[in-house]
Amino acid sequence: MNKRKSTIAFLWVAMIWLGGCAAPSVPQNVKKVADYSYSDDPSKYRPKVEVPDMTASEEPQVIQNEAIVGEYNIDEQLGAIVDSMYVRNDSIRQFNGFTILVYSGNNEIEAGKVRNRLFDLLPGQEARFTYKLPTYFVEIGQYFQQLEAAPTLKMIQETYPSAAIVPEKFPIINDDESGEN
């Protein structure tokens, strides 16, 4: 059995040695020059149009068009649908968006500190301090998409690494509700 193993090992070594002695088969670099010249005549593809010969005395004829009135006029139905869509959309008081949640916890003093620190970090934005029994939340920003909130989140995470983008519903304030008459 031992002799058989040594014979197999010898054959493997011989095959590897003989394979190593073979000439390398490296592909030769043959440089081909690409011909990028264009020699097609596109005029054979263009349609041939005959232009009538107009003399200065002939004036082009103008055809008066009238509005086409179809027998299936749906203007009234379409107006009713648009009006109902307007009323339905006007009744929507919230939109789905995203905000950055910076603090969530039971400590009101800590939440106040985080909110005040956010005023220093991002003076252009207003941090919201909310309380939903039994938790205090500090959120900042109103965004339509998470991608919009990402740069602000990166800045906040330098100070508060646990900050995250969370979904939120925001109220829609109409112009006529803003108090201006």
Image (tube, grey):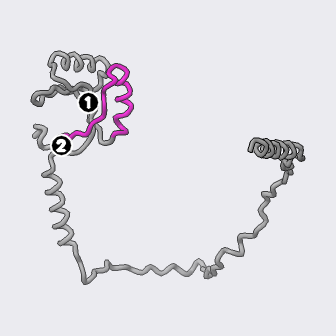
User: Quadrant location of the N terminus?
Assistant: top right
Q: Is residue 112 magenta?
A: no
Kindly give the residue lying farthest to the bottom in the view shown: 71
Q: Tag 1: residue type? A: Leu
Q: Nearer the viewer, residue 163 or 36?
A: 163
Q: In this picture, which residue range is highlighted in magenta?
A: 146-173
Residue that label 2 marks: 172
Tell me if mark 2 has few (under 14), some (14-19) or many (20+) residues whose alpha carbon lies within 10 angstroms of its own. few
122 or 55, which lies in front? Answer: 122
Earlier residue among tags 2 and 1: 1
- Which residue shows up at 77% across the image and 62% down it? 38
Few, some or many C-alpha atoms within 10 Å of disc 1 (few <14, some 14-19, many ≥20)?
Answer: many
Check disc 1 and report its element: helix, strand or loop. Answer: strand
For this view, does 33 lie left or right of residue 65? right
Amino acid type at circle 2 is Ile
Asked whether 40 or 76 is in front, the reply is 40
Residue at 29% x, 17% y: name it.
Answer: 120
Residue 138 at what x, y percent from top left?
21, 26
Residue 80 falls in which quadrant of the image? bottom left
Where is 163 relative to 10, above or below? above
Q: Is residue 47 above or below residue 110?
A: below
Image location (x, y in percent) of residue 35: 81, 58
Viewer-side label of 2, 1: 1
Which corner quadrant holds the C terminus? Answer: top left
43, above or below 122, in the image: below
Q: Residue at x 42, y 81 (%)?
A: 63
User: Residue at coordinates 75% horizontally, 70% vertically from top-left?
Assistant: 41
Is 163 included in the stretch rendered in magenta? yes
Q: Secondary structure at mark 2?
A: loop
Q: List x then y, in percent, for residue 47.
A: 64, 77
Pointer 1 residue: 101
Residue 165 position in % (x across, y down): 30, 34
